[in-house]
Structures are given as C-alpha cells and as structure tokens.
Amino acid sequence: MGKSNLVQAIRFLRNLLLDQNEAVGYEFGWERIVPVGESRPQTTVEVLFTIPGEEREYSYRIRFGMPGQHKWPNPAALALKEERLGLGNELLFARRQKDDGQWEWEKAPAVSPTPNPSNGNPMLGQFPSLQQVVFANAALSTGIGYYHFPATALSGATGQPHGQNLLQKVPGLSDAATNYLQVMRGITQDFHHPNIRKSLLATLRAVHPAIESIELDSLVNPQRAIIGHKAGDRTFELILEQESDGLRRFYAHLLALYQTPAKLLLVFEEPENAIYPGALSLLADEFKAAPREHRGQVDYHHPQSYSPGLL
C-alpha cells in the first residue's frame, strides 16, 4: 500500500463513521482499501490511537468481506464482517458475523438492554451512554481533518464539491475549505484564545510584510474576507479572492492548523503545491508547532517523499 492509499484509508474510515451510505460511493472509498486483484477480498482496517486526558491506548478494528456469491468490483456488496473496540487491556465491545451469516457478540457493550449485534453499519457511534466509546467515535470521525486544497482554494469559486452532503457533517474547516468564512468567524469570536488571530496575522506578514489585517466584511452574514495592505500611512482593502493562488492556499493551511476546536489529527496532501518557495519553511514551522501547542498531530504527504511525514 502506497502512502496516498494509507491516508485515503484514514479518510475513508472517518467518512464511514460519519455516514456509511455516503462514504461507500464517495471519492477514495472502497477502492483505496480493497487489495488489487482480489475477486473476494477480506479487508481489515485497524487503528491505534490516544486522546488527550486518557493515558491508555485505544484500538479500533473493522473487517469487511464479500457476502454470498458477490464478487468485486461490486462496492455495494462489500459488507461489514467484524468490529471491535478496545481501551488498554479492556475490550469495550466486539462483534463478528459467523459463517452462517448470523452475528454474535464476542463482548457485548456494558449497556442495558443489550443491543442486537446484527447491524450492517459501524456501531461505534451508537452507545451514547458509554463515554469512552463516544470519545473514540469523536476521535476517528469529527476529530480528523483531511485537506488537499485545490489551486482555487478561498477564491470564492461557485459550485458544490463532490460529496457535499457528507462533508457538511464534518465540523470545522471542510476538506476543500469551502466554509472558510464560517471558520474565520469562529476564530474572530473566540475571545478566550486571542493569540490565534495574532499568530495567523504574524505568519501572513512573514510572507507578505505589507499585510496589515485580515478580517471579515461582516460577523453577522460574512460574504468575503478583506485583507488590509499597508502602503505609506494608508491601508488599502483587497478581498481575499484578489490575492494570488499561493497566498490563498497558504492561508487555507493556516486556517486548518488554527481552527477551533482543534482537530486531533490533521492530514495534508501535497501541501507544497502552488505555495511560494519562501513560504514553505514557514509552513513547515507551523506544522511542527501544532502538536507542541496542542492544535493536533500533523501528517503530511508530497510526491517527492517515500513515506508520510508525521509531526
């Protein structure tokens, strides 16, 4: 499995937990986790992770297979076969589908009444009274940000991106930053973390010293972002859409890194594309600072690297 397939599998798991029906037909769905050439694949996705405030390590595993006489590539037929969640040495729940097609609990969740295990969707998000299970579900779904910004990022381009219904279920900055105005408004209204605005502006000014400010035209119903450029004793207003592709993409990465609340994991695909060469070191510094400042673990990928970078 290549590095892109690895991060797409993480993205697929996130989408699967948000909405299985949407995730199956979404870009980078089954084709990123099914072994090439297998007519009846058995595919397992297993992740080990930790969350703030919990010293023990979580483990979550789901396994898929082709039921009956179905053969790949019939993505609608690839069905869940096994699911288990553990925390440290404790197994929180585990279920599997037997050879006869019937489901059974290996370890039922500690809720009453005991739920029926024969559910074709992931059950990770279906036990709201079990706090540890809720935290695990949040970490693997809403806690993951995946970003592959196009050259048109923050340009005001119209049109609904593919998978819009699914992406609307991801809080914070969306995968293509189409909701950047709302994210900027959240940062502006976060008076308990004023350093976020200062840090954003300071990093932008390191790229373009003439930048004096970047604010919304309205906090009630924002339509555009305004960048103030200092020239002499005057500040000239430009809309963000008028800035270069490189500056817009650079700012999109900053919004992902500084969004509130912060993500647990931030995945960036090819972050160097269309960014000023002089700004790449600044972006690298921001990636390194994010985990130190509790703004999320950063995973980044670019074609020249053999393996992902993890900070």
Image (cartoon, rainbow, N blue to C red):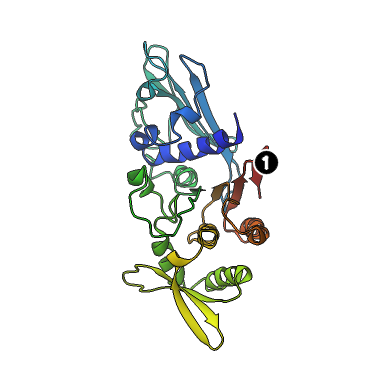
How packed mark 1 is, by other alpha carbons closer than 10 Å (few <14, some 14-19, many 20 or more), is few
| Residue name at image x 43 percent, y 52 percent | 174
Q: Nearer the viewer, residue 207 or 19?
A: 207
Q: Position of residue 202 (x, y in %)?
A: 60, 72
Q: Nearer the viewer, residue 245 or 215?
A: 245
| Residue name at image x 38 percent, y 68 percent | 224
Q: Position of residue 101 (x, y in %)?
A: 37, 15
| Residue name at image x 38 percent, y 20 percent | 74
Residue under numbered circle 1:
305
Q: Is residue 228 above or below residue 5?
A: below
Q: Is residue 98 visible?
A: yes
Q: Quadrant of residue 137?
A: top left
Q: Is residue 208 above or below residue 37?
A: below
| Residue name at image x 41 percent, y 20 percent | 73
Residue 120 located left or right of residue 131: left
Residue 286 located left or right of residue 223: right
Q: Is residue 100 above or below residue 133?
A: above
Q: What amino acid is found at the position of numbered circle 1 in the picture? A: Ser
Q: Secondary structure at mark 1?
A: loop
Q: Quadrant of the N terminus?
A: top right
Q: Nearer the viewer, residue 155 or 222?
A: 155
Q: Position of residue 149 (x, y in %)?
A: 49, 51
Q: Position of residue 275 (x, y in %)?
A: 59, 56
